[in-house]
Amino acid sequence: MTDHKPAIRAFLTQFFATDTLGDEDDFFAIGLVNSLFVMQLVLFVENQLGAAVDDEDLERANFASISAIDALVRRKSSVQAAT
Amino acid sequence: MDSIRTVGVIGAGVMGTGLAQSLAQSGHEVVLVDRTEDILGEAVDAVRQNLRLARMLGGPAPTEDRELVLKRISCTTTYEGIEAADFVIENVTEDWAVKRPVYEVLDARCAPRTVFAVNTSVIPITRVGAATTRPDRVLGMHFMNPVPMKPVVEVIRGHHTSQATVDTANRLLGQMGKRSVVVADSPGFVSNRVLMLTVNEAVFLLHEGVATPAQVDEIFRECFGHPMGPLATADLIGLDTILQSVQGLYEAFGDSKYRPCPLLTRMVDAGHLGRKSGKGFFDYASTLA
């Protein structure tokens, strides 16, 4: 299974310094989030990581950290592979 | 009292877009007016995107199909359908030369009972009222950005605004799931007068070498529990906008306590405008812009 974390980290670097950002750190809680970032993050997950994000997936918990996004992408790819 | 069903929203910028979304989500028919089809198209796209991402952005999530919500917004560059509006909220540029002709059109085309709300942080409400034939039905409604997420609105009673008009505005806010704080008409109202003077005074502290930007903001965040300090807030708003507001207060009151700090003027002249230019009191080159 592909590890998406490096790609996610590279994407985030466009928006904020990621040197000290841990895989579990919550961007929403740290206050690094604005609406433009949220939109671009969802588009990145859909278009670059190829996960078909459903409306019910659009919860903060699924996008709040590098690990959460990685888990979402894995979950969506296994669903896509199974269907 | 009848409920307010159709609301005209004039200006489809950031505020108008947020208002159109908030109104449509709470079941109102919206007539959204701006100068070009392109601006209106972008506004509708932004509403569609914001509805989809509502839960992630922390606002109220739509309880019905998004397309149903979007269908309630009709866009026009010619004020078509504005006659049906029970209530109009105007959000065009904060420049009286731009706002004035809008009120001439609205006053001529809307029913005499229709209330006009000026969504402004600076324009005197009494002056807007005087430009219409219905000064008793004109009031200020200073919505905060992002509109769908902010539950309280600063409502301003102009010199001639009637209690019935304030009641109507409060009824609309209630229908939108919001409420008001009603204040009298005065330059900067409450929000901008206190905020701008606070920011200006914080800049004087830097100018005099009393504290660093990080120290000023830390005191407000950590000691007072504000989510953001005054200088980070200024960077978010834009230092040019701050300077313009402070100058506006200085001109309106003629009181030296509103004189802009020379450091604020110098930063604007230097092009350090805050987040939008990548640098203000803080540096945004390597952080979220």
Image (cartoon, rainbow, N blue to C red):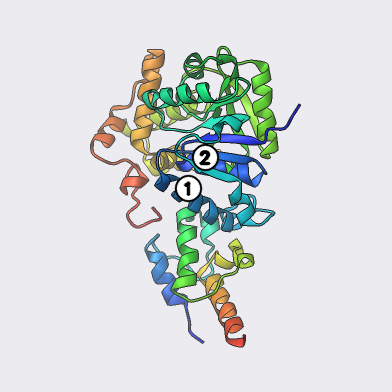
Residue B270 x/y as whole percent: 23, 38
Residue B32's disc number: 2
Q: Is residue A60 visible?
A: yes
Q: Are marks 2 and 1 in contact (CB under 8 Å)?
A: yes
Label 1 sits on a secondary structure element that is helix
Residue B1 higher or lower than A45, as above or below: above
Q: Residue B253 falls in which quadrant of the image? A: top left
Q: Say whether residue B233 is left or right of residue B160.
A: left
Same subunit: marks 2 and 1: yes
Q: Which residue is mark 1?
A: B43
Q: Residue furthest left?
A: B270
Question: Residue B266 appears at what percent x and percent y?
Answer: 25, 33
Report the residue that reaches farthest toward the right. B1
Residue B119 at x, y percent in the picture: 51, 30
Label 2 Cα crowd, 10 Å radius (few <14 / some 14-19 / many 20+): many
Q: Chain of mark 2?
A: B
Residue occupying the point 59% across, 61% down: A60
Is residue B146 visible to us here? Answer: no
